[in-house]
Amino acid sequence: MGQKVHPEGFRLGVKRKGEKVDFKSSWYSDRDFAALLGEDLKIRAHIEKKLVRAGISDIQIRKAAEQGEVAVDIHTARPGIVIGKGGSEVDALRGELERLTKKKVQVNVREVSRPELNAALVAESIAEQLVGRAAFRRTMKRALTSAMRSGAEGCRIRCGGRLGGIEMSREETISEGRVPLHTLDADIDYGFREAKTQMGQIGVKVWINHGIHAAADAGEGRR
């Protein structure tokens, strides 16, 4: 039986490009932990449901210890959709999150400059094309080629499910370059999305190797 570990969780605490790896949520509580965690899950679910077509790659949540304020950073490839005309969409989203959490919420929109090198966005793009009945091999190969041309040191894409509409589910994997999952110094970006097709769900996993951490090159990245 294979032992699978999430590439990002495996590297928590290892320096990335001279800085600590960002946690998905940044807050501390010695009590009410379950309530605060549930609040995070509600925020993420609401944003992902509302901004389905906005190309959301990551949602980071920060909470102040005393003030009861919540800061939400939305990393997206299409910031115009999130912000809206004159900031109307982001203001509406802020109001909805404040009603949901009953706290003051600050929403920051961060643009992902190179979506072809972001594993989550690559997986989302492949999933959208599979829903549109595109040929899965051609779609995977196109995404792989685009990532490698953009400067990735390695890329691996895996799709699993009723590929091509056949009755028996299977997995297809393509890769190019180096994707060293056991190397902690390697900057591995991982993304997962599900394509809800008429024939069933197809899982899409993407690993992209951005190279060795800058801090590791200086001899500071290992633990």
Image (spheres, grey):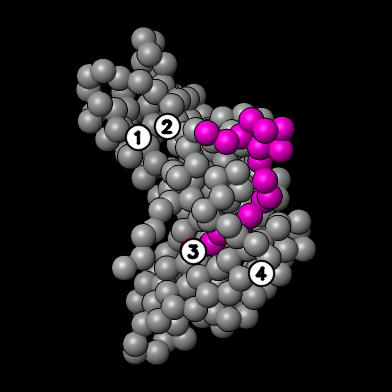
Q: Is residue 18 visible from the viewing direction of this image?
A: yes
Q: Are marks 4 and 1 in contact (CB under 8 Å)?
A: no
Instruction: Give the image location of residue 213, x and y in percent.
Output: 66, 41
Mark toward the viewer: 4 or 2:
4
**Kind of residue at badge 4:** Glu
Magenta span:
205-223
Check disc 1 and report the residue beneath it: 40
Q: Are marks 2 and 1 in contact (CB under 8 Å)?
A: yes
Check disc 3 and report the residue beneath it: 205
Whether the magenta-drawn stretch holds residue 133 is answered as no
**Kind of residue at badge 2:** Ser
Secondary structure found at label 1: helix
Q: Earlier in the sequence, mark 4 or mark 2?
A: 2
Badge 4 crowding class, 10 Å Cα cut-off, few under 14, some 14 to 19, many 20 or more, is some
Q: Is residue 9 above or below residue 177?
A: above
Name the foreground residue: 175 vs 138.
Answer: 175
Secondary structure found at label 2: strand
Occupied quadrant, residue 103: top left
**Kind of residue at badge 1:** Asp
Q: Is residue 177 above or below residue 137?
A: above
**Kind of residue at badge 3:** Lys
